């Protein structure tokens, strides 16, 4: 009589294993998603800004995200799916606090870069500041939430707005004043503002091709 022994391999499974599996690749996902988001934003900036201004804005966005990562370590916020989503969103939100200032600088005429930076800040500085505070005002109610995800969202947006305004108003202006593109090389063309219907018609006629 011959006996046959069959060996069966079994693998334990539990529903929580699916959630735990993501932490094996979370560090890779952070680097990959932030790199892709920064590259996409930089490509868009290069389409609308001179190279120096686009690189300066991209550098500000990179520094804002690095500062948020440092703030997460200070507050004990761990890297997870929620914080990863907030970090990627921060790349998009941080554009507002630097790109508008860079566009205003590039649109100004003159050879004095410091004067161009001053005039650009006068035109858009208050609007950028209001945009930052309105964003913070929209999420301030989350500070009183009981859910941990909402508290993390509020803290990260607090850091985003604070660091974004800090880089837009403190870091970017001196950088553009020193390394900005000369006004003769700018590619930014600013249309006059229409105050009424007749001004709008004049602008349309100015843009329309004239008959020979």
Image: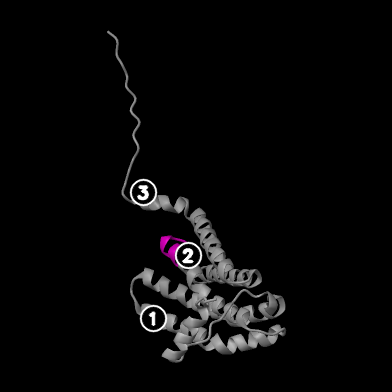
The segment highlighted magenta reads: 78-88
In the rendered image of this protein, does residue 20 appear above or below residue 172?
Answer: above
Residue nearer the viewer, 157 or 39: 39
Query: Alpha carbon of mark 2 to alpha carbon of mark 1: how far?
Result: 19 Å
Drawn side of residue 59 relative to residue 9, left or right: right
- Give the crowd class for mark 2: few <14, some 14-19, many >=20 residues within 10 Å: some
| Image position, residue 85 (x, y; %) | 43, 64
Residue occupying image coordinates x 49% and y 82%: 205
Residue at far front of view: 212
Q: Quadrant of residue 53?
A: bottom right
Residue nearer the viewer, 52 or 24: 52
Q: Which residue is mark 2?
A: 88
In this orientation, does residue 156 appear? yes
Residue occupying image coordinates x 54% and y 59%: 35
In the rendered image of this protein, does residue 136 appear above or below residue 4?
Answer: below
| Magenta stretch encompasses residue 83 | yes
Q: Which residue is mark 3?
A: 17
Q: Quadrant of residue 107?
A: bottom right
Q: Please tell me the numbered disc located at residue 138.
A: 1
Residue nearer the viewer, 138 or 148: 138
Quarter of the N terminus within the rendering: top left
């Amino acid at each position: 009589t011959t006996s046959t022994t069959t060996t069966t391999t079994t693998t334990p499974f539990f529903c929580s294993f699916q959630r735990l599996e993501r932490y094996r690749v979370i560090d890779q996902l952070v680097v990959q998603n932030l790199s892709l988001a920064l590259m996409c934003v930089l490509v868009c900036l290069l389409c609308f800004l001179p190279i120096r201004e686009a690189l300066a804005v991209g550098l500000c966005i990179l520094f804002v995200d690095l500062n948020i990562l440092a703030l997460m370590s200070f507050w004990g916020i761990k890297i997870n799916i929620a914080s990863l989503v907030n970090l990627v969103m921060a790349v998009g939100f941080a554009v507002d606090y630097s790109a508008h200032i860079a566009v205003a600088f590039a649109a100004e005429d003159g050879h004095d870069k410091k004067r161009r930076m001053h005039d650009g800040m006068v035109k858009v500085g208050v609007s950028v500041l209001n945009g930052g505070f309105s964003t913070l005002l929209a999420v301030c109610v989350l500070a009183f939430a009981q859910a941990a995800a909402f508290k993390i969202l509020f803290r990260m947006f607090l850091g985003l707005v604070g660091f974004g305004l800090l880089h837009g108003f403190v870091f970017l202006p001196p950088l553009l004043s020193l390394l900005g593109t000369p006004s003769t090389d700018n590619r930014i063309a600013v249309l006059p503002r229409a105050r009424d219907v007749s001004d709008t018609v004049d602008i349309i006629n100015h843009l329309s091709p004239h008959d020979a």
